Image (spheres, helix red, strand yellow):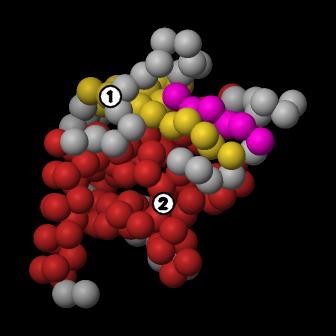
Amino acid sequence: MSLLNLNDLYKTVILEHAQAPHHYGLQPDLPATTLNNPTCGDVLTVQLVVTANQITTLQFSSTGCTISQASASVMTDVLLGKSVSEAQALIAAFSKLVMGTPIAKHDRDQLGDAAVLGSVAQFPTRIRCATLAWHAAAQALTEVTTDDQ
C-alpha cells in the first residue's frame, strides 16, 4: 500500500472512531479501571467482563484527544470476544507496533483497523495517547476474575 493510501486510511479510521466511538459508555454496576495520560490530559476508563475465559463485555469512557478516543474504540472492537490470552497477546502486539517494532503478519491481521495506528510510531509524543486504552485493558484483565473461579 502506498504511503498516501496508508495516511488516508489512518485519517479515516481515526476520524470514524473518534466521532462515533464503538462500545462507548459505562455501566454503574461493573468494576472499572481508569488510567490517565498527564502529558496530553487524556483520562480513560475501561470496563470488562470475562466469562469462561472470554471477554464478553468491553466498554470505555474517556475525555481526551482524538487519537486516544479512536484507539479505545478500535481496541474494544479488536478485543471483544477474545480469550484472555488472545487479548493479552494482541495488547502486546499493538504496543510493539506503535513503538515501531515490526510484528507478525498474523498479529497485524488480528489487529484489524488498530494496525493503522502503528503510524503513531512516527510521533513519539502520541504513543501514550494511542496505548492508553490498551494499557487500561491489560490492567483490567489482571484485576478481573472469571466467573469460573
x 53%, y 51%: residue: 79
Tell whether position 49 is magenta.
yes
Residue 4 image point, x, y percent: 12, 80
In the image, the segment drawn in magenta is 47-52
Vertical order, 53 against 25 (above or below)? below
The kind of secondary structure element at disc 2 is helix
Q: Do the residues labelled 2 and 1 touch (CB within 8 Å)?
A: no
Of the pair 81 and 8, the residue shown nearer to us: 81
Of the numbered discs 2 and 1, the one sitting upstream in the chain is: 1
x 38%, y 60%: residue: 114
Which class describes the residues within 10 Å of circle 1: few (<14), some (14-19), or many (20+)? some
Residue 67 image point, x, y percent: 25, 47
Q: Left or right: where does residue 81 sit relative to residue 41?
A: right
Residue corresponding to mark 2: 94
| Amino acid type at image mark 2 | Phe
Q: Left or right: where does residue 89 sit relative to residue 70?
A: right
Q: Quadrant of residue 1?
A: bottom left
Which class describes the residues within 10 Å of circle 2: few (<14), some (14-19), or many (20+)? many
Q: Which of marks 2 and 1 is in front?
A: 1
As measured in the structure, the alpha-carbon distance from the residue carrying label 2 to the one carrying label 1 is 20 Å
Query: Main structural element of the magenta stretch: helix, strand or loop?
Result: strand
Residue 13 image point, x, y percent: 23, 59
| Amino acid type at image mark 1 | Ser
